[in-house]
Image (cartoon, grey):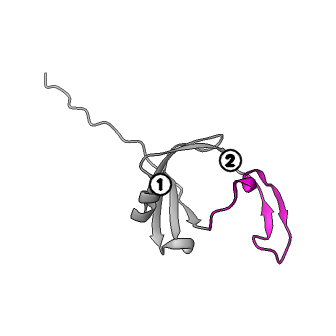
Amino acid sequence: MGVRRLAIETEDHPLDYAQFEGEIPKHEYGAGRVAIWDHGKYEAIKPVARSMEDGLVEVFLKGSKLKGRFVLVRTRGEGAKAQWLFFKAKPKIARLKIPEV
């Protein structure tokens, strides 16, 4: 079994925040150190809004660190406090029919 990470859904943030790194002062919303761990692009396997409703989101990540097919599976709740498991999907193995000799 591979590594699974907990992802907790939050509200949308303005795109202006996408490059922010630094310290948010104590007693302010989101207080603490903010660091960008990875950046890149993604390609949704199915429309994301519909997939989120179904509780299963599959994406192909093209980041500087994360690459390949990843999955988010909702484990609890809906809306702004939904919890998800995030993990890399195992590659699909083609089932080849080998001709008899």
**Total label count?**
2
Q: Secondary structure at mark 1?
A: helix
Query: What number is the disc on residue 48?
Result: 1
Residue farthest to the left? 101
Q: Which residues are magenta?
A: 11-36
Alpha carbon of mark 2 to alpha carbon of mark 1: how far? 20 Å
Residue 60 is inside the magenta segment? no
Q: Amino acid at mark 2?
A: Asp
Q: Are marks 2 and 1 in contact (CB under 8 Å)?
A: no
Q: Quadrant of residue 34?
A: bottom right
Residue 17 is inside the magenta segment? yes
Residue marked by disc 2: 38
Q: Residue 13, percent across and down?
A: 68, 61
Q: Residue 90, percent across and down?
A: 43, 46
Q: Secondary structure at mark 2?
A: loop
With 98 as the anchor, is 31 left or right in this view?
right
